[in-house]
Amino acid sequence: ETVLTQSPGTLSLSPGERATLSCRASQSVYSSYLAWYQQRPGQAPRLLIYGASSRATGIPDRFSGGGSGTDFTLTIGRLEPEDFAVYYCQYYGTSPQTFGQGTKVEI
Amino acid sequence: VQVVESGGGLVQPGGSLRLSCLASGFTFWSNHMHWVRQAPGKGLEYVAGITSNGDKRIYADSVKGKFTVSRDNSKNTLDLQMSSLRTEDTAVYYCVKEGAGNWKPFDYWGQGTLVTVSS
């Protein structure tokens, strides 16, 4: 089973700053199957990034993803107030799919 | 696209509950479907999934033998039958649509239904 470890657990930033979130896999994975989700308080998660670097429909271009092998990153170029949320990575190239434990981006 | 869960509620330890999800706005029969849960204040945990035609099911180890996922493509519904419930099964349960094809991300999530296991 592929375990995903996200860091940091919490990221404290201000609006306008850049956020860099990390997701590390316990073994090398296909980047084609790495996704990121955003979950705002009281809401369901929504898909941000798939295939490690492709933005989902309607996702602003301040969100970008990258990485390969075991190390992946989600970057938020300039934080907007609505970006303060919890972010999860997911590997969907295995069954059952696995999620990281989440990174909270807070003000 | 909409997926709407129902059936959550309070149940005693050892009890059973059946969750349902009604899908609309897409060709339900062509998409694999899943259940993902989130315990209060915790992260996302994969629970179960079923292929588009229902011929294959997958379960997390934590629910294997206790939960059964099923679907009715004629009614656009996805179900999760839960039995032998424990307090650690308390969570919001999300019905999730996988993108079309195989090995796709989860592109639509319901708003979730809360299951509380408590005496």
Image (tube, helix red, strand yellow):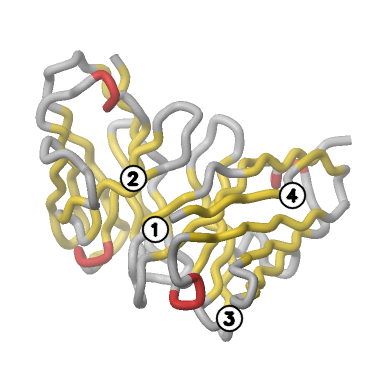
Q: Which residue is mark 2?
A: A37
Q: Which kind of residue does numbered mark 4 sit on? A: Gly
Residue at image coords 21%, 58%: A70
Callout 1 secondary element: strand
Q: Which residue is mark 1?
A: B106
Q: Quadrant of residue B117?
A: top right
In 3D space, how far apart are the residues under numbered discs 1 and 2 (Cα atoms)? 9 Å
In 3D space, how far apart are the residues under numbered discs 4 and 1 (Cα atoms)? 22 Å
Residue A107: percent from the left, percent from the top?
Answer: 29, 14
Please give the chain letter of the residue carrying mark 4: B
The residue positioned farthest toward the front in the image shown: B25
Please give the chain letter of the residue carrying mark 3: B
**Image position of A20 (left or right of B28):** left
Residue A71: percent from the left, percent from the top?
Answer: 19, 52
Residue at image coords 35%, 28%: A85
Please give the chain letter of the residue carrying mark 1: B
In 3D space, how far apart are the residues under numbered discs 4 and 3 (Cα atoms)? 21 Å
On-image quarter of the N terminus of chain A? bottom left
Q: Which residue is mark 3?
A: B54
Please give the chain letter of the residue carrying mark 2: A
Q: Quadrant of residue A58?
A: top left
